[in-house]
Image (cartoon, rainbow, N blue to C red):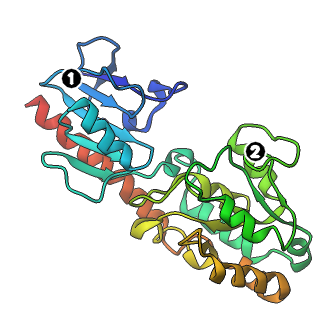
């Protein structure tokens, strides 16, 4: 039996219901002491972390890729595997498997049937229902890296932008759950869903939640080659530079002035044909890497 220890995760982390557990093909037991064979770490409160040299060392990174460099610098741990948001650089002796954070939000929801249903619902949206939606919203608590306020400042002259979060707060707050957020966004044509910053294929839950609400995403971030095989970038207004969004503003302005063009843009499929196979491949890549490590440790 393989003994696994989780450490340095976020405060409400549930170690008994984490996707890595489902990828372990051998009998395993989760422990909290130092009897572990495998230690699975994340990027929080690791400053005094010490690990057993002969253990399998896995890092799950759901934050910006720069968190990996900081973790390695401070801990000095030689990792066997990084899963999550990875770096664009090779790390000697360490496998890296890209596993975007947004998949954790949709592990039991996304399927090809779901994607087909969403695309079909978009295709059948009535013009008046779309026109009845409010202009735009943004739901964030901060803008530390200046990736959101510049977009807001360029758009506010066209209509009111509702902000129920701490950032630019101008209306009643909403609940804290993803369901609350998605329900609220469902009343809007556009949603500013910028990442905290750009990083190698750093795409969190923000864009998929916007899509779930059937908004048109105003997205700032690096989708990368994998995510663009799943999400149709032609149904997304991708802002590449928050300090110069004149081209994107012209697109939004045109859509607002021409209802037929807005409807045409809105009705585009958001999930690409066969996109679910790429999600399955992401999961399979992670499973294979974990299985390979554990099998080599067991010999």
Q: Secondary structure at mark 1?
A: loop
Picture coordinates of residue 8, whole percent (x, y):
39, 26
User: What is the quadrant of the N terminus in the image?
Assistant: top left
Of residue 176 and residue 49, the one placed in the foreground of this image is 49
Please say if the residues under marks 1 and 2 sit with CB atoms less than 8 Å apart.
Answer: no
Residue position marked by numbered label 2 in the rendering: 165
- For the point 87% across and 69% down, the residue is 159
Task: Tell me, yes or no, if residue 68 can be seen here.
Answer: yes
Vertical position of residue 206 compared to residue 222: above or below: above
Which residue does the numbered mark 1 point to in the structure image? 37
State how many labels appear. 2
Does residue 121 appear anywhere in the picture?
no
The secondary structure type at the circle numbered 2 is: loop
Identify the residue at horizontal 53%, vertical 24% (top origin). 11
Quarter of the C terminus within the rendering:
top left
Which residue is at a point 38% across and 33% down the rendered structure image? 42
Cα gap from disc 1 to disc 2, whole angstroms: 43 Å
Q: Judge left or right: residue 152 versus residue 51.
A: right
Q: In the rendered view, would you say 5 is above or below 120?
A: above
Q: Is residue 197 left or right of residue 207?
A: left
Q: How many C-alpha atoms fall within 10 Å of the one at disc 1: few (<14), some, or many (≥20)?
A: many
- Label 2: how many Cα within 10 Å (few below 14, some 14–19, many 20+): many
Q: Earlier in the sequence, mark 1 or mark 2?
A: 1
Q: Residue at x 49, y 67 (%)?
A: 230
Residue 139 location, x and y as percent?
A: 72, 50
């Amino acid at each position: 039996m393989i003994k696994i220890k989780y450490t340095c995760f976020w405060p409400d982390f549930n170690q008994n219901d984490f996707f890595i557990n489902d990828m372990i093909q051998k009998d395993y037991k989760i422990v909290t002491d130092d009897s572990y064979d495998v230690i699975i770490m994340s990027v929080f409160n690791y400053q005094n972390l010490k690990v057993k040299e002969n253990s399998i060392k896995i890092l799950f990174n759901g934050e910006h890729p720069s968190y990996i460099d900081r973790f390695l610098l401070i801990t000095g741990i030689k990792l066997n595997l990084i899963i999550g948001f990875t770096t664009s650089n090779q790390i000697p002796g360490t496998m890296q498997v890209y596993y975007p954070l947004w998949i954790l939000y949709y592990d039991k929801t996304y399927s090809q049937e779901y994607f087909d249903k969403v695309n079909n619902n978009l295709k059948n949206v009535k013009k008046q229902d779309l026109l009845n939606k409010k202009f735009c919203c943004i739901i964030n608590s901060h803008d530390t890296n200046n990736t959101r306020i510049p977009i807001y400042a360029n758009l506010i002259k066209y209509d009111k932008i509702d902000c129920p979060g701490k950032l630019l707060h101008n209306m009643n707050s909403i609940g804290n759950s993803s369901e609350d957020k998605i329900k609220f966004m469902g009343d809007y044509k556009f949603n500013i869903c910028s990442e905290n910053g750009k990083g190698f294929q750093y795409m969190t839950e923000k864009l998929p939640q916007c899509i779930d609400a059937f908004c048109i995403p105003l997205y700032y971030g690096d989708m990368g080659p994998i995510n663009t095989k799943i999400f149709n970038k032609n149904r997304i207004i991708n802002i590449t530079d928050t300090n110069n969004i004149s081209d994107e503003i012209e697109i939004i302005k045109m859509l607002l002035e021409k209802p037929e063009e807005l409807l045409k843009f809105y009705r585009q499929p958001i999930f690409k044909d066969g996109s679910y196979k790429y999600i399955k491949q992401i999961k399979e890549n992670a499973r294979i890497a974990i299985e390979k490590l554990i099998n080599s440790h067991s010999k």
